[in-house]
Image (cartoon, coloured by chain):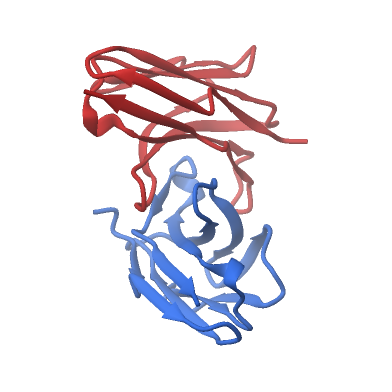
Amino acid sequence: KNQVEQSPQSLIILEGKNCTLQCNYTVSPFSNLRWYKQDTGRGPVSLTIMTFSENTKSNGRYTATLDADTKQSSLHITASQLSDSASYICVVSEGYSSASKIIFGSGTRLSIRP
Amino acid sequence: DSGVTQTPKHLITATGQRVTLRCSPRSGDLSVYWYQQSLDQGLQFLIQYYNGEERAKGNILERFSAQQFPDLHSELNLSSLELGDSALYFCASGTYLAKNIQYFGAGTRLSVL
């Protein structure tokens, strides 16, 4: 069964610190993996997207890594800011057709404390 | 701004009623996806349309239905509403030609009283 699992479920860190969020998947055939940021009550916004051949992608203070062999991805946030408080969702696409499945992880809720 | 427009932003109604949520996708996007997000829950995929045709179905109740029109906008119809249907409903658009990137609207917050 295609699954995407994220850890931890929630995380609290102090402003200015770094953190790493994890995503493990069992989706096959793998197409791409995306990280989204969702502020409370808002729609998710794409942070990074990686295909099979890409193992790292940065977007400002966000850096995503992908190990397609172990089917693991991580999202590293550097020098956290209060505005980073949000849910971070890992999303994996299966296949390449218009009907390919898109599987969402349940998200990691990140809280940044001043 | 993602380019995806959802209306209305907020909707308050009573149990047993029927409502329609509307979504206008980004220009050029043929796929429209609908998601439900209950309080403090993850996104639950409801249904996907591609160029007017239903492509994939998720955990969509029989009381719910959707369609995509020739101009590619989509509507999600929720009927015989129950208290548990209160949630944020998101629409996303995209095209599988662009690595299946989905662009999300701001959502419609439905409150069933």
On the picture, is B113 further left or further right than A96? Answer: left
Q: Which chain is red?
A: A
> Where on the picture, by quarter, is residue A105?
top right
Residue at x 42%, y 78% (from the top left corner): B12
Q: Which chain is displayed in blue in the rendered image? A: B
**Place of residue A54 in the rendered image (x, y in percent of width and height, measured from the top left):** 46, 18
Of residues A44 and B14, the one nearer the viewer is B14
The quarter of the image holding the N terminus of chain B is bottom left
Residue A100: percent from the left, percent from the top? 63, 47
In the displayed structure, A92 sits above or below A80; it is below
Question: Is residue B23 shown above or below B46?
Answer: below
Examine the image and state in which quarter residue B64 appears.
bottom right
Q: Looking at this rendering, what residue extends furthest in the bottom direction?
A: B17
Q: How many dots with numbers?
A: 0
Q: Is residue B70 visible?
A: no
Q: Is residue A79 above or below residue B2?
A: above
Q: Position of residue B49 (x, y in %)?
A: 57, 65
